Image (spheres, rainbow, N blue to C red):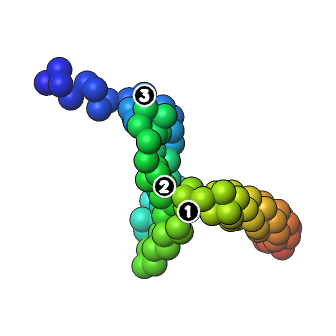
Amino acid sequence: MRYLLIHARSPGRPARGTRVDEYARLNRPGLYGDAFVRVLVEDTSRRRKEPRVKLKIGDCSNVIELEFSLGSPQLRENSLFKVDTLIGALQRFRDGLAAEAELADRRS
């Protein structure tokens, strides 16, 4: 069993060989289905290769997986632009959703 300890990790701490390795459910327990987000960024500091990079988002019936490449300066810049654009859009979405939730609370 000791050999399995190399794969064990503390919550919030990436597994060996990864910079980010997370799977999170997007719904609170007991609500809806199996919505999730899965993110992975491999750590290649000890070897020369392009890392595996994964961003997958799923809801009850659909899954999207976005591609991010680090193969050239232009692709690296575009991958970071893509993430920054997603973060901005999600923040604006959250702000709008919070405003509507507040209105819904007042109406109830």
Q: Amino acid at mark 3?
A: Ser
Q: Secondary structure at mark 3?
A: loop
Residue 50 appears in view:
yes
Front position in the image: 64 or 26: 64
Q: Amino acid at mark 2?
A: Val
Residue labelled with disc 3 = 10
Q: Quadrant of the N terminus?
A: top left
In the figure, 62 relative to 46: above or below? Answer: below
Residue at the top extreme of this rendering: 2
Give how far apart the Cα atoms at labels 2 and 1 are.
Answer: 6 Å
- Locate residue 108, reporting x and y percent: 78, 71
- The earlier-in-sequence mark between 2 and 3 is 3
Residue labelled with disc 1 = 68
Give how far apart the Cα atoms at labels 2 and 3 are.
Answer: 21 Å
User: Can you tell which quarter of the image residue 73 is in?
Assistant: bottom right
Residue in the image at 42% along x and 28% along y: 10
Horizontal side of residue 34 vs 12, given as left or right:
left
Label 1 Cα neighbours within 10 Å, binned few <14 / some 14-19 / many ≥20: some
User: Can you tell which quarter of the image residue 77 is in?
Assistant: bottom right
Residue labelled with disc 2 = 53
Residue in the image at 44% along x and 42% along y: 48
Q: Amino acid at mark 1?
A: Phe
- The earlier-in-sequence mark between 2 and 1 is 2
Image marks 2 and 1: residues in contact by CB distance under 8 Å: yes
Horizontal side of residue 80 vs 20, given as left or right:
right
Residue in the image at 56% along x and 56% along y: 70
